[in-house]
């Protein structure tokens, strides 16, 4: 494969590219086991079986209109000025079966969705009959005047139009949407086998943190990442197990990590930059392996990745996100979300990317891939992207206003206003663009 030659003056060769970091992480994740779940609870999960229909759908030819079932040949040439008058042999409502065959030269009153009687091959809508006038004049509908010559098959929905008996209606690997659980219900299912959701332990670390709801002591800040990362886990289909805060103290950290090892993956934040790295290394190193990476991205350069010894000899992957709230979420988006989707049996792991024209410049000062927080909108049929505020990794509100991350590539020192950029749409599901 051709090497991309980095041209940025500050390029550091020993940093991992975002792709390499992602591949390394993904290699430790597998698709989780299947579970049987009631359909509604399985919404959003990946189907772990093929669902077949035991019957044709619809099961019988049925009416597409409220009207009169007839033989097309009996109403040939009918019009407003020359109606065909037919005796009405009964009514079929939705949910009933027709009592008998339709005899030539007769009609049966029929409702939408009701089975078309054998012998009938067309339905004429009420509007194209003289039913209203007959009712208004008190004559009743013992017979009916047909005012339109409908062809064979008119307003008749054939049996098996949607699905043939035995056909797969939902294939393994499909993410269950509202329409998909409707399809499962239409073939009589109440539950489905789906890939279970991953349980993700979320741990915030740092002596400066306190939980919202408490009075802030001097010098302390509220724990942001416990909420934001757990929210991102939920949005990615995972089940967060929020462990709270571990102060920078080995005993406290060890106790929290023990709790986290019940999960499928442990995500911590902070303690991975040069300052407190050694402490985290000591604590995690005793419970498995841990590596500290520099990823060629901004924000979120420092990252820890490890494998911890869990219960029953299970290895529990650990991803250590940087502490700054924007870094934590951007690293989650690039590196954790794909892993959670992979565990759920998804094959599309990337957000949709659009080409947008920048309204502000994005600067790349040191040869890392920049993920700038932007709001994408459409103007004259084109996407435009505007920065949502200051781009410091500690400044969170601009990310809360962003719907995209605009990328300035590693080897591009600046993208100016008016330039095109690729933008990852962080509020679009990965299926949004095909
Ligand atoms: P650290 O990686 O521990 O050096 O943290 C980097 C920065 O992120 C520091 O300013 C921390 O106070 C901040 N930080 C770390 N964890 C959190 C958190 N859970 N919520 C808000 N800020 C945090
Ligand atoms: Mg810290």
Image (spheres, rainbow, N blue to C red):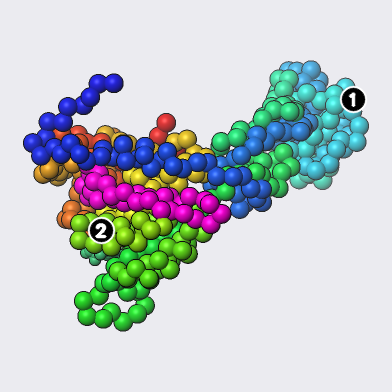
Front in this rendered view, residue 382 or 325? 325
Q: Provide residue 425's location: percent of width, then percent of height.
A: 33, 43
Q: Name the residue located 53 percent from the left edge and 52 percent from the top edge.
A: 313
Q: Earlier in the sequence, mark 1 or mark 2?
A: 1
Q: Residues within 10 Å of mark 2 (few under 14, many from 20)?
A: some
Ligand 2 occupies quarter: bottom left
Q: Position of residue 133 (x, y in %)?
A: 74, 40
**Label 2 sits on residue:** 277
The reply, left or right, for residue 314 in relation to residue 3 is right
- Residue 36, how many percent across, how many down? 66, 48
Q: CA distance from mark 1 to mark 2?
A: 87 Å
Q: Is residue 414 visible?
A: no
Please tell me which residue is depicted at 49% across the width and 52% down the height of the picture. Answer: 264
Res 63 → quadrant? top right
> Is residue 315 rendered magenta in the image?
yes
Q: Residues within 10 Å of mark 1 (few under 14, many from 20)?
A: some
Query: What range of the chain is rendered magenta?
Result: 288-317
Taken as a whole, is the magenta stretch helix, strand or loop?
Answer: strand
Based on the picture, tell me whether residue 354 belongs to the magenta stretch. no
Residue to which mark 1 is pinned:
103
Element on which disc 1 rests: loop
Q: Left or right: 155 with respect to 290?
A: right
């Amino acid at each position: 494969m051709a090497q991309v030659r980095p041209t940025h003056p500050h390029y550091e060769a020993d940093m991992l590219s975002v792709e390499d970091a992602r591949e390394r992480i993904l290699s430790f994740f597998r698709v989780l086991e299947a579970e049987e779940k009631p359909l509604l609870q399985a919404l959003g999960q990946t189907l772990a079986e093929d669902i077949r229909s035991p019957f044709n759908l619809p099961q019988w030819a049925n009416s597409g209109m409220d009207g009169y079932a007839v033989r097309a040949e009996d109403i040939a040439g009918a019009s407003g000025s020359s109606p065909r008058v037919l005796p009405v042999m009964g009514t079929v409502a939705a949910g009933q079966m027709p009592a008998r065959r339709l005899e030539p030269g007769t009609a049966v009153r029929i409702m939408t969705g009701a089975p078309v009687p054998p012998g009938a091959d067309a339905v004429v809508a009420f509007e194209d009959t003289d039913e209203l006038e007959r009712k208004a004049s008190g004559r009743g509908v013992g017979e009916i005047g047909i005012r339109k010559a409908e062809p064979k098959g008119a307003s008749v929905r054939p049996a098996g139009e949607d699905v043939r008996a035995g056909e797969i209606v939902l294939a393994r690997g499909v993410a269950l949407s509202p329409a998909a659980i409707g399809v499962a219900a239409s073939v009589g299912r109440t539950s489905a086998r789906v890939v279970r959701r991953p349980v993700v332990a979320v741990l915030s670390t740092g002596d400066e943190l306190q939980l919202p709801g408490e009075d802030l002591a001097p010098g302390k800040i509220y724990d942001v990442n416990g909420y934001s990362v757990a929210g991102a886990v939920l949005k990615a289909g995972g089940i967060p197990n929020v462990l709270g805060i571990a102060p920078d103290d080995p005993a406290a950290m060890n106790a929290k990590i023990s709790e986290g090892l019940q999960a499928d993956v442990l995500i911590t934040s902070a303690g991975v930059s040069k300052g407190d790295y050694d402490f985290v290394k000591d604590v995690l190193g005793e419970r498995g392996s841990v590596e500290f990476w520099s990823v060629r991205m901004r924000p979120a350069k420092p990252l820890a990745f490890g494998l911890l010894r869990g219960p029953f000899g299970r290895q529990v992957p650990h991803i250590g996100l940087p502490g700054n709230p924007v870094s934590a979420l951007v690293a989650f988006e690039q590196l954790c979300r794909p892993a959670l989707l992979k565990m759920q049996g998804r094959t599309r792991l990337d957000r949709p990317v659009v080409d947008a024209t920048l309204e502000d410049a994005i600067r790349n000062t040191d040869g890392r891939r920049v993920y700038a927080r932007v709001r994408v909108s459409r103007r004259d049929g084109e996407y435009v992207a505007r920065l949502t505020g200051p781009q410091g990794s500690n400044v969170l509100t601009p990310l809360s206003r962003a719907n995209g991350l605009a990328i300035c590539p590693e080897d591009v020192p600046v993208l100016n206003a008016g330039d095109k950029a690729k933008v990852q749409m962080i509020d679009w599901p990965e299926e949004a663009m095909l």
